Structure formats: structure tokens, C-alpha cells
Amino acid sequence: MSDSGSAPVHPNARTPEDVFRDFRGRRAGIVKALTTDVEKFYKQCDPEKENLCLYGLPNETWEVTLPAEEVPPELPEPALGINFARDGMTEKDWLSLVAVHSDAWLLAVAFYFGARFGFDKEARRRLFMMTSGVPTVFEVVTGSGKKQSKNPNGNSKNKSDPKPSKKPNSNSKPAKQPPQKHEEPISKEDKGVEEQAYLCGSCGERYANGEFWICCDVCETWFHGDCVRITPAKAEHIKQYKCPGCSNKRSRE
């Protein structure tokens, strides 16, 4: 087997932020395999081949290959034999199944690094908050992610606007529940981690001034134009934009 993510992208990583960058890169690769690269991914998962696994790599690419031969492997292994189930169910259900197992694998790898680098309770909590702040692969593939708040007037969003009409700010956040009596006050650090919830649905990066973003009219998730290959000029001619996950979902129903 090739090195399929058997070595971390940050060999000297020591912080939750380092591990989260590794998580985000692997997640982006898997999302590509199950959305924009789905035809290529489907063909590589031939049931006539041996047990195959889907690996997300830290450089935002993906690979379908055999699992590691060594026991135990250097990193947790993804679900084995995803190719065997390909022709035994609808393509939509198969992709959803692979997505669920991929989410479990991504978390396993992240917290393996957490243990390896000796994260304490606070560092593990920060890592959990960051990994929970981006949509799961399953949510992206099925379009079942939580919808962002709509504009108060109910109008659709302007796709040609160079930035989201509802940028990640205090006005667009869901209402917070009052803390329970047993909970500790939210620290400044926790508030910073909460901001991770307002990220691109594909790559997980935050919005930056001047970037072109586009919002899916189905799941209402925001994406960098570059991540979904939509330019401002192309957006001008799109009456209703569907992200890769929602497009795949509807084309297979």
C-alpha cells in the first residue's frame, strides 16, 4: 500500500490547531471523492477487487487502496471493503454509508493524534469543538446539514455578491441556550473555538474579506466559489444554486 495518510502531515504537531488542520485536509479530500470526484471514485471501487478503503490525505486529496498490512497500523484504518457494497444498494445509499464511516475514521485519526501528543482534558475539548464546528461528510453528501438562518425578509441571497450577505457574525449565529447551572462560564478561548462553526462547507476555512462565496439554495450552506468551481461571472446566470452534495442527492433519488 502507498503511504495513504499513514504518516501525519504535521510530524511535529503538538497543538489541537495542528491536528485540526490535518483533520480538515483529510476531510476535504474525502468530500471531493464523494461529491465532485464521485464518478472517478465509483469506478475505482470495483467489487471484483480486494478489500478497499477510502483514505483522505492531509493535502486535501483522496485515495482508494488496500489497507495497511502491518498490525497494528500506524494510524487507525478506514472502513474495510467499501467496494463490496457498491452494487448491493443504491448509489445514494452507498455514498451515504461510506460518508458515515469516513466521519468515524476522521475523528479516530484526530483523537489518535491527540493521545499520541499527550493532549490534556482542555486540549481534547478544544479539538472536539473544532472538529464539531464543520459539517460532517455525511451532511455534505446528503445535504442534511443544519440550515443557516435565512434573511429576515425571506428574499433569496444574491449569488453575485462578492461576499455572503450573512457573513459569520453575531447576527447570523443561532440563539444561544442559557448555560445550565452546572456549566462554567464561556471563556474567550471557547468563544474563539465557537467561530469554527462558521466555515466553508467544503474546505472548512473561514470567510475572509474580498473572497467570493456562494450559498446553496437547498441546504443553505456557504461555500468558497473556488471550492465548488463557481466564479462570480458564472453565478450571475444561476437562478438556483445547488451544492455538490445536494445535486448528487437529487440526481440519484
Image (spheres, rainbow, N blue to C red):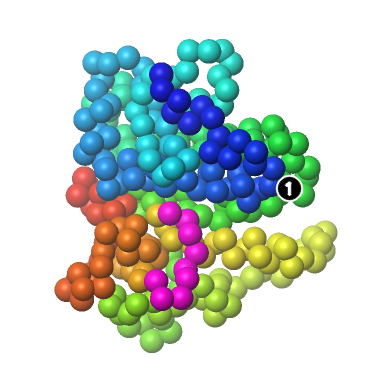
Q: Farthest residue in the left direction?
A: 237
The residue at 68%/66% (across/down) is 191
Residue count near mark 1 (Cα–Cα under 10 Å), binned few <14, some 14–19, many ≥20: some
Q: Farthest residue in the bottom direction?
A: 153
Residue type marked 1: Ala
Count of marks, rendered view:
1
Q: Nearer the viewer, residue 236 or 141?
A: 236
The residue at 47%/18% (across/down) is 68
Where's residue 142, x and y in %? 35, 49
The answer to whether 129 appears left or right of 189 in the picture is left
Helix, strand or loop for the magenta stretch, by majority? loop
The answer to whether 162 appears left or right of 174 in the picture is left
Q: Nearer the viewer, residue 222 or 139?
A: 222
Where's residue 31, x and y in %? 38, 45
Is 201 within the magenta?
A: no
The image shows residue 91, relative to residue 65, as above or below, that is: below
Residue 80 appears in the picture as rendered: no
Q: Quadrant of residue 99?
A: top left
Q: Please report the bounds of the magenta region as a residue range.
A: 203-211
Point out the image quarter for the N terminus: top left
The image shows residue 215, relative to residue 52, as above or below, that is: below
Is 209 within the magenta?
A: yes
The residue at 57%/61% (across/down) is 196
Where's residue 168, x and y in %? 51, 72
The answer to whether 2 appears left or right of 89 in the picture is right
Q: Quadrant of residue 67?
A: top left
* Local SS, label 1: helix
Q: Farthest residue in the front direction?
A: 12
The answer to whether 87 appears left or right of 119 in the picture is left
Where's residue 167, x and y in %? 47, 75
Q: Which residue is mark 1?
A: 123
The image shows residue 194, relative to residue 13, as above or below, that is: below
